[in-house]
Amino acid sequence: MISAGLAVVRAEGLEALSMRKVARELGVGAMSLYTYVPGRTELIDLMIDDVYGGLALPEAGAPWRTALGQYCREFWALYEREPWLLQTNMWRAPLAPCVLDAEEAGLRTLIGTSLAPVQVVQTIGLVDMVLQGLARSSIAESVDRDASGVGQDDYWESMNSFWEDWFDVDRYPVMTRIYLAGGFDNDASTFEATLARLLDVVEMSVDAAAEAG
């Protein structure tokens, strides 16, 4: 049943998931599914836990930056494989074994640092929000590219006349300053570049907590 539900959402998106479609995928009557799960919500919970089970989570004892980097890369890959996850409320993920394993692994990456327990929770929460935001942006760009046939670089290239004819350098002095300094001419939008900056921010927090005792 879980595999059938995943087949539906991978092909059509989460909004298309229904018990009737899952039953059709299985070749059974829809009512027979209720013998196993109460309804669609519970099936989605089982599907979430199933895909979380595919995460290669960092082991205990690894240096925090290495472990947290692995945690981030695994979730980034998961969101790329299963974009429908981002249509669910990630802050109400089911209290299921594989989901809890992932949460445990994330918290474990930082619990041995100088961060206080509450700071560990806050930091992993921040990391999760950044990862989800990046994944949503990547998905939105893919949807626009597929719909329009225009990639990101070509899109911005097509906007050249706006910058030349309409952009007001006096109204937007900071943007202008950064542009002239080449601040927008870099590879900062790649996942690995963003991850490196994110880990740097966490490292600054760890160092600040150590200095504060």
Image (cartoon, rainbow, N blue to C red):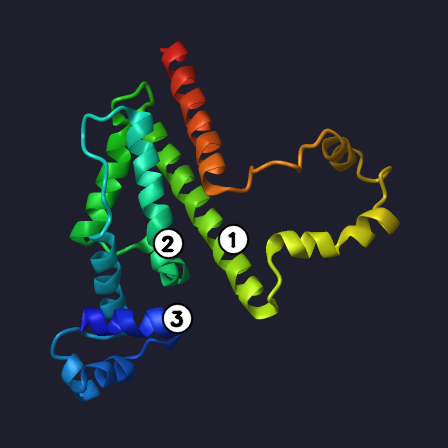
Residue 137, disc? 1
Residue 143 position in % (x across, y down): 52, 64
Residue at 12%, 75% in the rendered image: 36
Residue at 34%, 69% in the rendered image: 10
Q: How far apart are marks 2 and 1 (CA)?
A: 11 Å
Residue 170 position in % (x across, y down): 87, 37
Q: Distance between the residues labelled 1 and 3?
A: 17 Å
Residue nearest the observer in this picture, 174 or 122: 174
Q: Residue furthest left?
A: 35
Q: Which of marks 2 and 1 is nearer the N terminus?
A: 2
Image height of 3 relative to 74, above or below: below
Q: In the rendered image, which quarter is residue 144 located in?
A: bottom right
Residue at 29%, 82% in the rendered image: 21
Residue bearing the label numbered 2: 79
Image height of 166 relative to 144, above or below: above
Residue bearing the label numbered 3: 13
The quadrant in which the N terminus is found is bottom left
Element carrying mark 2: helix
Q: Judge the density around disc 1: few (<14), some (14-19), many (≥20) Cα neighbours within 10 Å.
A: few
Residue nearest the observer in this picture, 4 or 152: 152
